[in-house]
Amino acid sequence: MNDAWLPEQYARFRAERERPFHDLLALTRPIPGGRAVDLGCGGGALTRLLHERTGAAETVGVDRSAAMLAGCERHAGGGLRFERGDIEAFAGEGLDLVFSNAALQWVADHGTLFARLAGMLRAGGQLAVQMPANHDHPSHATAHAVAREPRHARALGGHVRDDPVRAPEWYAAALERLGFGEWHARVQVYLHRLAGPEEVVEWVKGSLLTDYRARLDDDAWEAYLADYRERLLAELPPERPYFFTFKRLLLWGRLGA
Ligand SMILES: C[S@@+](CC[C@H](N)C(=O)[O-])C[C@H]1O[C@@H](n2cnc3c(N)ncnc32)[C@H](O)[C@@H]1O
């Protein structure tokens, strides 16, 4: 599979995409002199902010995409460094903070994953996670419906993205069961004011659709994208501006506190 992350495409809605990061950071308590990891850190600018705001002595940003990590070195230093690697393979121990903004929706089996993340923390350590939970919006539902159409299903080898993100209640119970004595779980609705519904296509090209892009050659991708655009625009109201509603899960917990 290709590395389909396109930093320029992802950055097109930078201010809009950064809002949940700031909301997650606001839930996170300082860890002066502590050790943190930012899983799926992307380009590194937000990891820099995380490192400074938490007062950590050491923060590691981990991401598997070389394209996203390109240029991250300019944010490194003063205890912040970056590593290329898979979240699935990252092994932390005795950490004060495991942080992840908009990345764990790409990792399967959240039962195993959240237990593993909790196991990386020292007593009193924090877990802070933000993930999209917008499965029911036409932007997402249409992407999977088009992938199931015979022509695209053949090109994709039958792949349809199986979103691992569970219901908010599931995370609340999981945090409690995993020993987070203090925790917070909420769904927050963001509203993005886009010029028109066609901009939704540009938005998801920088995120959800990378999963399909990575599995298709150029021609098959163009065909998929054309069908996606046509079906999506038939479903969304043709209003200008278009208000793109986007639900996200914000989760925070402190272990054993
Ligand atoms: C939507 S971006 C978020 C980047 C950054 N956290 C931010 O808030 O801007 C998701 C990032 O997760 C990374 N990612 C996705 N799955 C991953 C995995 N299994 N292991 C490591 N990185 C992963 C992608 O390469 C991408 O940079």
Image (cartoon, helix red, strand yellow):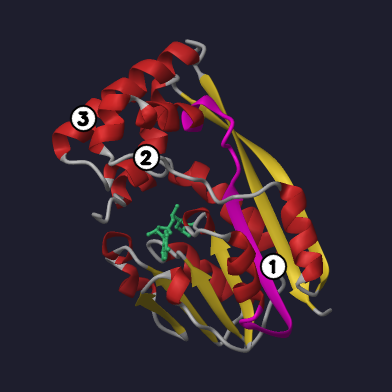
Left/right placement of residue 141 relative to residue 253 reads left
Of residues 97 and 225, the one nearer the viewer is: 225
Q: CA distance from mark 3 to mark 2?
A: 12 Å
Q: CA distance from mark 1 to mark 3?
A: 41 Å
CB atoms at circles 1 and 3 under 8 Å apart?
no
Asked if the magenta segment contains residue 126, the reply would be: yes
CB atoms at circles 1 and 2 under 8 Å apart?
no
The disc labelled 3 sits on which kind of residue?
Answer: Glu
The disc labelled 1 sits on which kind of residue?
Answer: Thr
**What residue sits 43% from the left and 11% below the top?**
234
The disc labelled 2 sits on which kind of residue?
Answer: Leu
Q: Which residue is mark 3?
A: 222
Ligand 1 is found in the corner quadrant, namely bottom left
Label 2: which secondary element: loop
Label 1: which secondary element: loop
Left/right placement of residue 3 relative to residue 59 reads left
Disc 1 residue crowd, few under 14, some 14–19, many 20+, Cα 10 Å: many
**What residue sits 81% from the left and 66% below the top?**
176
Label 3: which secondary element: helix
The answer as to whether callout 2 falls within 8 Å of ligand 1 is no
Q: Which residue is mark 2?
A: 209
Of residues 176 and 73, the one nearer the viewer is: 176
Asked if the magenta segment contains residue 120, the reply would be: yes
Q: Quadrant of residue 40?
A: bottom left
Of residues 130 and 90, the one nearer the viewer is: 90
Q: Is residue 8 above or below residue 257?
A: above
Q: Which residues are magenta?
A: 119-140
- Which percent across, then down, holds residue 231? 39, 17
The numbered dot on residue 28 is: 1
Q: CA distance from mark 1 to mark 2?
A: 30 Å
**What residue sits 65% from the left and 54% below the top?**
23
